[in-house]
Image (cartoon, rainbow, N blue to C red):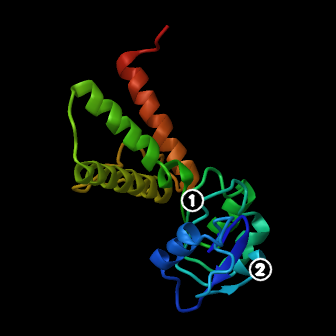
Amino acid sequence: MNDADGTIYNPEGIDAVDLMKYVNENPKNLKRSVLGYPNAQSISKADFWQVKADIAMPAALGGEITAEIAEKMNVKLVAEGANGPTTPEADRVLEKRKIDMIPDIICNAGGVTVSYYEWIQNKRMESWSEKEVDSRLEHALKKNYRIIRDIARNNPRRSDMHDSRAFCIGKPVDTRCAAMILALKRIEAHYMLEGFSQ
């Protein structure tokens, strides 16, 4: 775990609930940092990026994962919880190393998607439960990520959850490019139906 003031590591794992209590409820932790958490050791930020893990989730700053860092990462997947945490050069390194990527355009789209759900509820004068909102969000993110993966792999297919046949372009592309292809093809489809507004 890393934040602006500290980086910690525990090879046995970190209890997220306990860490949150330390960060948010400890009156001595004025910076609200992971620094000093007693159930993990302090490590350097350079070492942090080399920790063996299934998933790395950069969720704060843009440009954090450079090509140099991407060369050293020991993960299977990068899930971008921040806007633009991976540089274009690092994208190419991760692709070359076959480290999967969930790009920011889909990985951290939950907030804007739920804002859209709020707008729909207001427009329809409806009130959805938290469970219903979470269920709709989960379905939307999974569906769109599956389409993006199909575009990236040039694997047009239809399943119970998604249909990527209209979006694949005939050749494999990186995942970030696939996300942009999906977005642009949806915009194109809208303009084909509705035309350009004045």
Query: Residue shown at 39%/50% (left/top)?
Result: 144
Sort mark 2 into few (<14), some (14-19) or many (20+) by Cα contacts within 10 Å.
few
Q: Is residue 30 visible?
A: yes
Front position in the image: 166 or 75? 75
The amino acid on which the numbered mark 1 sits, given as a three-letter code, is Glu
- Give SS at disc 1: loop
Q: Say if 160 sits above or below 25 in the image.
A: above
Sort mark 1 into few (<14), some (14-19) or many (20+) by Cα contacts within 10 Å.
many
Q: Earlier in the sequence, mark 1 or mark 2?
A: 2
Q: Looking at the image, which residue sits at the far top?
A: 198
* Quarter location, residue 166: top left
Front position in the image: 43 or 18? 18
The amino acid on which the numbered mark 2 sits, given as a three-letter code, is Ser
Spatial separation of the CA atoms under disc 1 and disc 2: 21 Å
The residue tagged 1 is 80
x, y (%) of residue 179? 51, 48
Q: Is residue 49 visible?
A: no
Q: Say if 70 sits above or below 88 in the image.
A: below
Front position in the image: 140 or 29? 29
x, y (%) of residue 84? 65, 51
Q: Is residue 127 left or right of residue 106?
A: left
Q: Is residue 166 left or right of residue 81?
A: left
- Give SS at disc 2: loop
The residue tagged 2 is 44
Task: State the quadrant of the N terminus.
Answer: bottom right
Query: Residue shown at 38%/57% (left/top)?
Result: 146
Q: Is residue 86 left or right of residue 17?
A: right
